[in-house]
Amino acid sequence: MIELKKISKNVYEIPKQGKMLVPSVILASEKLIEKIKQDKTLEQAKNISMLPGIVEKSITMPDAHQGYGFPIGGVAAFDLKKGIISPGGVGYDINCGVRLLKTNLTKKEFLEKREKILDELYKNIPSGVGVGGELKISEKEMNELLEQGVEWTLKKGFATKDDIEKIEDKGCIKNADAKKVSQKAKARGKNQLGTIGSGNHFLEVQYVDEIFDKKTAEVFGLKKDEITILIHTGSRGLGHQTASDYIHKMEKEFGIENLPDRELVYAPLESQLAQDYVQAMNASANFAFANRQIITYNIRKSFEKFFPKSKIKLVYDVTHNIAKFEPFKINGKKIELCVHRKGATRAFGKGRKEIPEEYRKVGQPVLIPGSMGTASYVLKGTKEAEEFSFASTAHGAGRLMSRTRAKEEITESSLKKELEESNVKFRAGSIKGMLEEAPRAYKDIEEVVRIVDELGISKKVARLRPLMVVKG
Amino acid sequence: MKYKFLEHTADMKFVVHGKDLKAIFENSVLALSEYISQGEKVEKGVTKRFKIFGRDYEELLYNFIDEIIYFLDAENFVPSNAKVKLENKNDKVELRAIVFGDHAKNYKNLESAKSATYSEMYIKKKMGKWEAQVVVDI
């Protein structure tokens, strides 16, 4: 049994003990902490606190569940001199993330043509396994894309200047080097540009169902009953291969002795290998930003066919699997740290220069999608998050039930009935894949959002309800 | 039983049994095949041959699974089964494999995998037989 102390409402702690260098803080309600106890999440949270150079505490979000290395929903910041970087703290799907688009269409207008749009989107945006994207790029173009991200898509006509302003890091993380990404990774990614993939990745058309913060919703351009579109995907095979490549390199160079879990293999931040991984990770992140941009381009084309006057703008694009170099105040001193967010969203408050100018007076948009068929939330980042959780918050509903159990317990007909009752239409490559992602296999998004809102590490702005889902 | 899927909140976890180490690798492909094809029988018209190394059996198994995922991603290859040969070479273990399978376009319900992981991985000899456990990020 892992010792767990309740500190205050929604805050638990595994006190520093044994090889732990700092305590491990778990953010959860009484209900969610019981769920979190049921798998290896706490053990993995404890392991993070043993990594060299960790600053202050490791943090586990309310939507957390067991992963590999870090739990999904794990956050940790490392000192640049004494600290490390670990691919197991970023995840295989580098820059897995969420993009939210808003349209000028009302729910009523959209519903009249819903079936047609659903077919069109399913046709134009490849999802599932073995389905490549339309866009074929040369090796030279791939290298440019890896270093320029969405800038490259702007040059090719897939993006607007306004799009770029509304993406974390403007869709291009500097210090990316295509040479640090292996040929094998590039081979896996080259046919996957503009594709969603399978697993928990999806595309959803929604409407703004409720607004909680009128002023901020206005700044984000969200209006009640207007149609929004949410994209959840990442760097596809290119990122997965990059993570694997560097796990092996780090094992070879720094060994696996003294690790609480082999998946937590790391490189000291001051080493050349850490620098190489950072440049490869950033290149993979740029691939993911470009991927979501090309999907956006195809969504615009699909909507224009049936709604010639439709205007689709970006609200924001966030990454929830990444390590970033960001300044934080520690013991009254401002220092740069390497923050790992694995299944966690950045949540900068107002005034930060890293967020789009238009949003600077309210804070960055935080996008937390629910499970398939349930609500998603738009929140805003806060100063509290910067002070308490290394500017991080939750990233989703969080899995509850294993995929095996979901397939055993949930029948195709009961899932279809459930989606119909909530008025959600869907297209999916694999029905079994849909069962794995059924809403019942996830935690309650309402509960996750309530906790982060109560803690103040992000504040509710609007709720979005799905009208249709496209999934691999 | 050659392999069995186990409970894991988010990823795919299986335990595999074999009379020798070679069988551990070959039976892992059967588990991967069942997961990727969602239980549908996979034809064997396409073959992939490759050679990989590992500094220990765990790394070898990680690399082996990753190589198969690579073929799925980069060449739309769905695995069915495999034949492998293992050989100790200096401080490494070499694995030569022929993997049989088919093109992804011939299957409707496919699931993908992102990567092998070291999470909870072990390979051990138990009462004269071999057993291994793997978590695959999906």
Image (tube, rainbow, N blue to C red):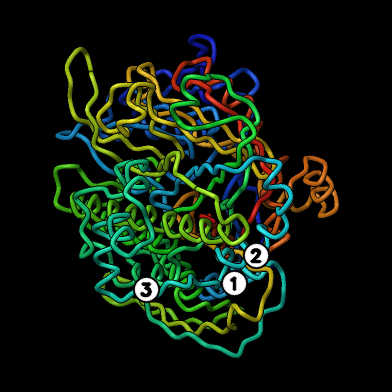
Q: Between tags 2 and 3, which lies in front?
A: 3
The local secondary structure at tag 1 comes to: helix
Disc 1: CA contacts within 10 A as few (<14), some (14-19) or many (>=20): many
Is residue A352 visible in this depiction of the protein?
yes
Quick one: quadrant of the N terminus of chain A? Answer: top right
Question: Badge 3, how many Cα within 10 Å: few under 14, some, many 20+?
Answer: some
Q: Are marks 2 and 1 in contact (CB under 8 Å)?
A: yes
Badge 2 and badge 1 both on one subunit: yes
Q: Residue at x 59, y 24 (%)?
A: A211
Q: Is residue A39 above or below residue A133?
A: above
Say what amino acid the circle numbered 2 marks. Answer: Tyr
Q: Which mark is residue B27?
A: 1
Q: Could you tell which of marks 2 and 1 lies nearer the N-terminus?
A: 2
- Asked if marks 2 and 3 touch (Cβ < 8 Å), the reply is no
Residue A373 in the image, given as x and y percentages of width and height: 69, 43
Image coordinates of residue A171 in percent, x first then y, are: 32, 48
Residue wearing tag 2:
B3
The chain that hosts pointer 1 is B
- What kind of residue is marked 1? Asn
- Count of labels in the image: 3
The numbered dot on residue B19 is none
Residue most toward the top?
Answer: A8
Pointer 2 indicates a residue of which chain? Answer: B
